């Protein structure tokens, strides 16, 4: 079975089944926004939502994570976490799945990160494809992430009163087989999926004024652009843009000692290139002075450096950085300003 059909009236039955299989995280409404949370009541799960405040990254790359326990006298260390529990991320947008793929290439690079990889091995990803724009901040079409591009176990598409589910892994197949309310998709339902995606093409348009190849070339020539000065003048260095980004992976390590000063725990905790002290070294030398240089670095970390290293753009088009920016700096406007300047 490659594609399965689930009636929406049976969705809560499936969610209860998933909840029995593993720890289940899904989207629920929080005031006027949305968040990923552990599922307590299946009827609270949302499938129609704008990107959550934080990406699901917080579950496979936690904001604060214990690395090792240690003692000084006698000196010894031990892993802080021996094993991770199985968990399911339900209803993940394609832009956030693209973010997971970006994180994978980083943490699978030698030396591999065992905590990240062990946690990812325990994770099952059930995505949902967007059929309309979440809001005006997204740039998923220009990044090619408005459509599924792998990286998931199951992918749902809304067909009105039913969900069609693409089965993309053995792990995903185990979650839909043996259930009498989930059937194999018929040819008519496959045709409806095809027509639904054709209609989607009329809705999603390029947000950048040039193709990604042009964007890359522009970043190759825009290191001293006046655009960075304009962005720097607006920036208030709050760090919101990096805190909500699904592909930012910078972290700091900190040791916490108990009162005996003999035993402690080493943590890693999210860090941000937008913080004033991030690029400071001994002697207080700062390799990235000014908010303009820090913002420039952030953009280059999405559109230039990872393309050179991993052949992959690290902007997923989710729009979170623009949505969360206290200074209303728009990623799309910034990139298009660079493209316009290059044309002059």
Image (cartoon, helix red, strand yellow):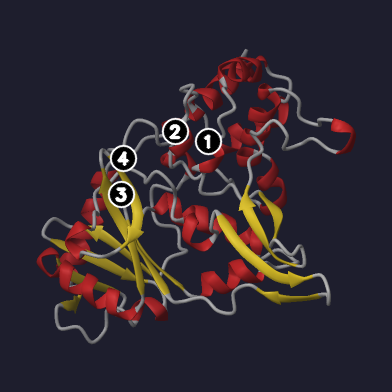
Specify which label sits upstream in the sequence, 1 or 2: 1
In the picture, measured across the screen, residue 267 lies left or right of residue 124, that is right
Q: Which residue is mark 1?
A: 241
In the picture, measured across the screen, residue 184 lies left or right of residue 211, that is left
Residue in front for this viewpoint, 18 or 186: 18
Circle 4/circle 3 CB separation < 8 Å: yes
Q: Nearer the viewer, mark 3 or mark 1?
A: 1
Label 4 secondary element: loop
Q: Nearer the viewer, mark 3 or mark 2?
A: 2
Whole-angstrom CA distance, mark 4 to mark 3, is 8 Å
Can residue 7 be seen?
A: yes
Whole-angstrom CA distance, mark 3 to mark 1, is 23 Å
Q: How crowded is the residue under tag 2: few (<14 C-alpha within 10 Å), some, or many (20+)?
A: many
Q: Which residue is mark 3?
A: 130
Residue in view at x 59 percent, y 70 percent = 117
Q: Which residue is mark 4?
A: 134
Q: Position of residue 280 (x, y in %)?
A: 79, 35
Q: Which residue is mark 2?
A: 324
In the picture, measured across the screen, residue 121 lies left or right of residue 283, that is left
Residue in front for this viewpoint, 13 or 175: 13
In this rendering, is residue 133 above or below 148? above
């Amino acid at each position: 079975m490659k594609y399965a059909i689930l009636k929406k009236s049976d969705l809560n039955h499936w969610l209860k089944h998933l909840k029995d299989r593993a720890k289940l995280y899904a989207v629920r409404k929080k005031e006027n926004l949305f968040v990923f949370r552990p599922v307590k009541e299946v009827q609270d799960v949302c499938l129609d939502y704008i990107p959550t405040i934080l990406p699901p990254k917080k579950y496979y790359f936690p904001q604060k994570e214990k690395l090792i326990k240690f003692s000084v006298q006698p000196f010894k260390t031990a892993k802080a976490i021996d094993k991770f529990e199985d968990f399911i991320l339900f209803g993940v947008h394609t832009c956030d799945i693209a973010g997971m793929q970006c994180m994978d290439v980083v943490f699978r690079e030698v030396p591999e990160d065992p905590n990240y990889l062990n946690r990812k091995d325990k994770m099952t990803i059930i995505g949902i494809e967007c059929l309309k724009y979440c809001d005006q901040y997204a740039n998923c079409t220009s990044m090619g992430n408005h459509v599924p591009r792998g990286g998931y176990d199951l992918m749902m598409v809304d067909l009105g009163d039913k969900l069609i589910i693409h089965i993309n892994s053995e792990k995903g197949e185990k979650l839909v087989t043996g259930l009498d309310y989930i059937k194999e998709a018929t040819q008519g339902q496959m045709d409806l999926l095809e027509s639904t995606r054709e209609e989607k093409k009329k809705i999603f348009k390029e947000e950048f004024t040039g193709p990604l190849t042009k964007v890359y070339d522009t970043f190759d020539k825009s290191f001293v652009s006046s655009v960075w000065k304009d962005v720097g003048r607006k920036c208030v260095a709050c760090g919101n843009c990096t805190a909500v980004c699904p592909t930012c992976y910078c972290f700091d390590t900190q040791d916490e000692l108990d009162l005996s000063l003999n035993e402690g725990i080493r943590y890693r905790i999210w860090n941000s290139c937008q913080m004033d002290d991030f690029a400071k070294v001994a002697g207080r030398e700062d390799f990235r002075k000014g908010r303009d240089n820090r913002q420039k670095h952030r953009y280059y970390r999405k559109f230039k450096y990872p393309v050179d290293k991993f052949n992959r753009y690290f902007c997923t088009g989710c729009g979170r950085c623009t949505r969360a920016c206290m200074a209303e700096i728009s990623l799309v406007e910034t990139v298009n300003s660079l493209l316009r300047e290059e044309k002059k």
